[in-house]
Image (spheres, rainbow, N blue to C red):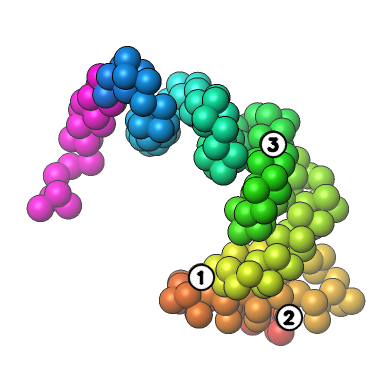
Amino acid sequence: MCSFIPKYHWFPLRVCFISGSRVLLAFFVELGMKREQTSALTNMADVLMKLGDLPRAAALLNECVLTFRSLGDAKGEGMAVGNLGMLFRRMGRMDDALGCSKLAVQSFEKIGDRGSHAREMASMGHTLRAMSRNLEALDMFNASLAIAEEIGDVMLVGSCAYTLAQMAPPLPQFMSLRQSLAKRAADAYRKVGREDLARDAEAMLRGVSS
C-alpha cells in the first residue's frame, strides 16, 4: 500500500518522526537511560541524513559517540564514530572522516572485534582513495581483505576484491591480478546471493579478458 503514496508525502512523516524522537530522547535523558539515548540519537540522525540535513545528523552522531564513551562501550563508540566518519566523507570533510576511521579502528582493536576492524579499514580505504592517497588505500583494502578471508566475511571479501580490481592499473603487467580479483569478487558475491554485484564483477572480468 505504501508503494502507491507519492514520495513527497514521506517528508512530513519523517518530520513527525524526528519530533517524536526528540520527546523520547528528552524522556531518556531525564531518566538517565543512556543506551536508549543512543538508539534515539542514531534513529534521528538516520532520518536527518535521508532529509539531506547532514550537519545536524553529524551533531547527533557526535553526541552518540560521547554517550557510548561515557558508558565505556568501546564497540558502540567504534560503530558510532565509524558512522560519523562515513557521514563526514559524504560531506567532503575528508580529514575528519579519516580521523574518525582511525578512532573506530582503535576501538575495535581494543576489544578484539576483527570483523568490525576489517570493515572500518575498508571504509578508511574509501576515504583515502577519495583523497587520492591510493597507495595507502591499497594497503587498507588488502589488510581488510586478508582479515575478511580469515574470519569468513564473504560479503567483505567481495567488496574488497572488487575495489582492488578497480584500482589495479590498466597495464599489461597488472591484467592477471585484476582478472583474479574480479573473479574472487564475483564468486564471493554469488555465495551471498548478490547476483547483481556478481554480474558487475563479471563485466569487469570480461573487460579484462577482451
Q: Secondary structure at mark 2?
A: helix
Q: Which residue is mark 3?
A: 103
Q: Which residue is mark 1?
A: 197
The quarter holding residue 13 reads top left
Determine the residue positioned at 54% across, 25% down: 70
Highlighted magenta segment, given as a residue range = 1-23
Label 3 environment density (alpha carbons within 10 Å; few <14, some 14–19, many ≥20): some
Determine the residue positioned at 41% across, 33% down: 35
Q: Which residue is mark 2?
A: 180
N-terminal of the pair, mark 1 or mark 2, is 2
In-front residue for pair 114/9: 114
Q: Position of residue 112 (x, y in %)?
A: 67, 53
Measured in 3D between alpha carbons, the distance from the residue under mark 1 to the one under mark 3, in whole angstroms, is 30 Å
N-terminal of the pair, mark 1 or mark 3, is 3
Determine the residue positioned at 81% across, 56% down: 139
Measured in 3D between alpha carbons, the distance from the residue under mark 1 to the one under mark 2, in whole angstroms, is 16 Å
Q: Position of residue 195 (x, y in %)?
A: 45, 76
Overall secondary structure of the magenta section: helix
In-front residue for pair 184/4: 184
Q: Position of residue 99 (x, y in %)?
A: 71, 33
Residue 24 seen in this snapshot: yes
